[in-house]
Amino acid sequence: MKIIKNIKLDIDKDVVWRYQEYSRKKVKKPNQNILQVTEEEISRGDSLFKPQGIYCLLKINGFLSEEEIELKDGYILRFSSSIIEQLKEVTHLLVGVVTIGSSLENKVSELFSQGEYLRALALDAVGSVAVEDFSQKVRNLARQEVIEQDFQTSRHFSPGYGGWDLSQQEVIFKIIPADKIGVKLTKGYMMLPQKSLSWVIGVGKKVSKSFSEDNYCKNCQFKSCKYRF
């Protein structure tokens, strides 16, 4: 089990605007006021990020069915058949949880309560971009560790996306002591703080190359997503 902290996050302004449903390349472009507010909230967000991540590598005991994988210590993860197809050659799973903490979302709530809706929405978008960036950085670190052991890796999968049922969060939280980085799971399988992400990555000697690129938008079947890159 490894805990990662204190990584510098990179906030892409274009992605922050896209989370607010704006784009310089589309009809709905951000005006000067929105541009200024976004810049200011990116600066504010930098002081509110408390990034922490935790992950581990677990050996796969076997594929129990067309939808179930049994891991070491008896943990069983249930996936959609399309994800199982992408994991059929893996021998291990990297399992991780990351967060940027609760400070940013507390500030967002404060801004909403003060009627600062534009700033609240901008800061919330900054938080979404931040946790995605941190998650990718932690995944890259985890991948590098196993690549140095002559393994290959699949793209990542997160509960609630790509046909993977959100209820599988419960299994991930049994595997990962996420409380060590201040993350808890609600009865509805939502993570607190909200700006948190969980994922698994397939690891093996012969991972299918067609699925190895870590580009969620490229592999996602939801082609009309407004956040699509």
Image (cartoon, helix red, strand yellow):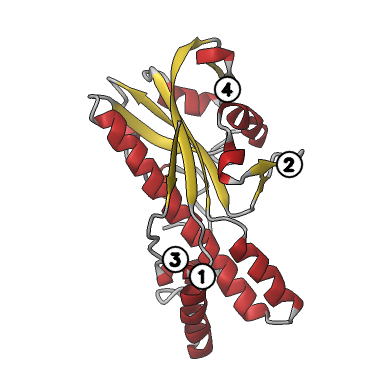
Q: Amino acid at mark 2?
A: Thr
Question: Which amino acid type is marked by label 1?
Answer: Gly
Q: Mark 1 vs mark 2: which is more N-terminal?
A: 1
Label 1 sits on residue = 45
Residue 133 sits above or below residue 25 on the image: above
Say whether disc 2 or disc 3 marks the residue closer to the N-terminus.
3
Amino acid type indicated by mark 3: Val
Q: Which residue is mark 4?
A: 77
10 Å crowding of disc 3: few (<14), some (14-19), many (20+): some
Residue 195 location (% of width, % of height): 58, 54
Residue at image mark 3: 15
Give me the residue at 42% from left, 42% from top: 219
Q: Residue at x 59, y 23 (%)?
A: 78
Q: Residue at x 58, y 30 (%)?
A: 172
Q: What is the distance, in whole Å, between disc 1 and disc 2 at their CAs?
A: 25 Å
Of pointers 3 and 1, the one earlier in the residue sequence:
3
Residue 209 visible, this orientation:
no
- Spot occupied by residue 33 in the image (x, y as percentages of width and height): 53, 89
